[in-house]
Image (tube, rainbow, N blue to C red):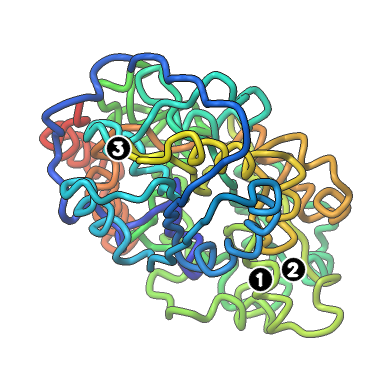
Amino acid sequence: MHRLTRRAFTGLGLAATATLAASCGRPDEGGGSAAEPAEPIAEGPATGSLTVWAMGAEGEKLPELLTGFQEENPDVTVEVTPVPWDSAHDKFTSAIAAGTAPDVAQVGSTWMAEFVGLSALEPTPESIATEDYFEGALGSVTVDDTVYGVPWYVETRLVYYRKDLAEQAGITEPPTDWDGLVALAAAFQEKADATWGISLQPGGQGSWQTVLPLMWSNGGGVVDEAGGEFTFESAPNEEALAYYQSYFTDGLANPAPADGVTEQDFVSGAVPMFISGPWMMSAVEAVGGEGFADKYGVFVMPTKETSSSFLGGANLGVFQGTENRDAAWKLVEYLSRPEVQVQWFSISTDLPAQKTAWEDDSVSSNEKFEAFRTQLDTALAPPVIATWEQVAAKFDAQVEEVCKNDLAPAEALATTQSDAQGIGTGA
């Protein structure tokens, strides 16, 4: 099982640790129609003071990035408050209710629709261009055809594999389709002495992040185009969930993996393949030591109808009621510049949300990062609905029954559909 690291819980991929524990399923106001256009941003440098909340490592590293903004705007003061991810959602909802939200904040993308429903976020002014963002990332800040805030950074998931062990098993090119991925996992076991062919999460917290892309890949999905009806029960979804289940029933993936051993098992060759995000590059190389980077590769998710992957990351939002609105949006505009996103990549290794930033050599020169860039063109975000985290938790529970207890995929999807309909979309 790949480790659910800090970024596995951020943004679009916010899993159950940051669930909607304190929120209701159906906000009473907002979320039903497009918002009024945003007011223009006043010209001139930013002044006054700003409060900014950012989570985890981003909150710790952001002050370094803001030195350029403060040089351009010497009369503004920016105070950054780092917020732990596991308490962030409750801290936000409490602040929104009390009218003490920050001016600007890093916002988990699965929270966007909920916060818009609570009338907490401002629509994005037209002067802040949004054309250069990856389509999936822009979709994560779009609620009822209105854009709120901007994508800050993105991440997506690829397949990590031991190239050297694949060659030992007689496979010199990474697979491109579902059958090929199964064949590679089996070859690792049969010809490269692997204990398990691939590490996959056997249901539970956050497993939807791997299963849902398989549904997308097969032409399925979990809500209709209007975002008002759930569509878990479908033939494409059932086939995708059965495919995921087969890794466990066929003995290719461990149904009871230990926590926190992905890097060690990958380096030792015990489990030479897993699916995860860009942060795992440094993690496996730290364990593998000098020269290990040449022993492994990454490749885009295998294709059924499409090559689909999960699009994660985090957004930036300006909160309603800020007393320094113009300065807040000027800060968001600054952090949205491609050159600033490249600088942020050098500080944090968070992948730029702007396509233009990927033209910089510091981002594009690494062939592994280039594979992530390729996947970003077809990566998708989960539904932008206020109740997604509650629905996802129900789906996670059913995926666990499928993987560990051999529950029929059709039954699991029927139960999830019923649960989802009971929760609603929050509209």
Asked if disc 1 and disc 3 are in contact, CB closer than 8 Å, the reply is no
Q: Looking at this view, is 284 or 20 the one in front?
A: 20
> Would you say 91 lies left or right of 67 here?
left
Looking at the picture, does residue 129 appear above or below residue 161?
A: above
Q: Residue at point 64% right, 53% down?
A: 70
User: Whole-percent x and y of residue 103?
Assistant: 39, 46
User: Whole-percent x and y of residue 328?
Assistant: 48, 41
The extreme front residue here reads 75
Q: Which residue is mark 3?
A: 321
Q: Residue at point 24% right, 55% down?
A: 397
Q: Quadrant of the C terminus?
A: top left
Q: Which residue is mark 1?
A: 272
Rounded to the nearest angstrom, the CA distance separating label 1 from label 3 is 51 Å
The residue type indicated by label 1 comes to: Pro
Q: Which residue is mark 2?
A: 162
Looking at the picture, does residue 11 appear above or below residue 130?
A: below
